[in-house]
Amino acid sequence: MKYILIRHGETDWNKEGKIQGQKDIPLNEVGEQQTKEVAQILKETFHITTIYTSPLQRARKTAEIIQDYLKAKLLTKSDLKEINLGIWEGKSWKEIKNKNSDTYSKWSVDRCYTRPEQGESYNELLKRTLSCLENIDVGTDQNVLVVTHSANIMVLKSILHKTDFAKMSQYKEKNAAYTIITSEDVATMKNNY
């Protein structure tokens, strides 16, 4: 079985370089157009009957637009939310480096277990995202669409490819881009974890 993981379309905060985390930021017009374009590609390429989505509105709207094209069932899973980056949310990475230098320094060396204040670690994000994928009831579906966020996809691919979290940005997807993993990949990630 294939999990087609798609990052939500663009938001104004993506464009401005602000950290979104779990702040509930909507898609912008570009994000809606990106989503329509990828929805057409998905419709022509895959047979998808079920879409799972993060409840954050940027992912939810992405899923709803795609649902219109695919006529698929849409289910919300809170464990697909973006990483909670606590007090860093709404700021740029440059601001975080300058204002939270001690915490940022620790985090940049050990992203796996270091949490920003009031946030979660990438390890915690990985646990909930991987658990969510494992518990998706796929029934007879061969392809399942999962609408989520950049960090969720990066941690999954880092574990799959045995890449240190400090180098996870190499797996960052563009807005409204998708990547495919298989049920075998999910089993491998669980073993690598």
Image: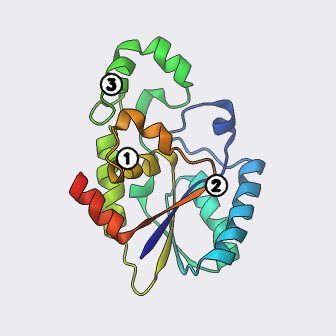
Indicate the amino acid at tag 3: Val
Asked if 38 appears above or below 115 in the picture, the reply is below
Please say whether residue 44 is visible from this viewpoint: yes
Label 1, label 2: how many angstroms apart (C-alpha)? Answer: 20 Å
Question: In this figure, what is the number of numbered marks?
Answer: 3
Q: Secondary structure at mark 2?
A: loop
User: 184 and 139: which one is in front?
Assistant: 184
* Residue that badge 2 annotates: 176
Looking at marks 2 and 3 on the same chain, the residue that comes earlier in the sequence is marked by 3
Please say whether residue 120 is visible from this viewpoint: no
Residue at 69% from the left image edge and 59% from the top image edge: 35
The answer to which quarter of the image holds residue 20 is: top right
Residue 76 rendering spot, x and y as whole percentages: 48, 65
Asked if 102 appears above or below 44 in the picture, the reply is above
- Give the colouring mode of the picture: rainbow
Q: In the image, which disc is placed on residue 109?
A: 3
* Residue that badge 1 annotates: 158
Looking at marks 3 and 1 on the same chain, the residue that comes earlier in the sequence is marked by 3
Residue at 33% from the left image edge and 58% from the top image edge: 130
The answer to which quarter of the image holds residue 39 is: bottom right
Residue 188 rendering spot, x and y as whole percentages: 28, 61
Indicate the amino acid at tag 2: Ala
Label 2, label 3: how many angstroms apart (C-alpha)? Answer: 29 Å
Residue at 71% from the left image edge and 51% from the top image edge: 31
Q: Secondary structure at mark 1?
A: helix
Residue 9 in the figure: left or right of residue 168: right
Residue 193 rendering spot, x and y as whole percentages: 24, 51
Q: Secondary structure at mark 3?
A: helix
Q: In the image, which disc is placed on residue 102?
A: none
Q: Quadrant of the N terminus?
A: bottom left
User: Is the residue marked by circle 1 packed among few (<14), some (14-19), or many (20+) residues within 10 Å?
Assistant: many
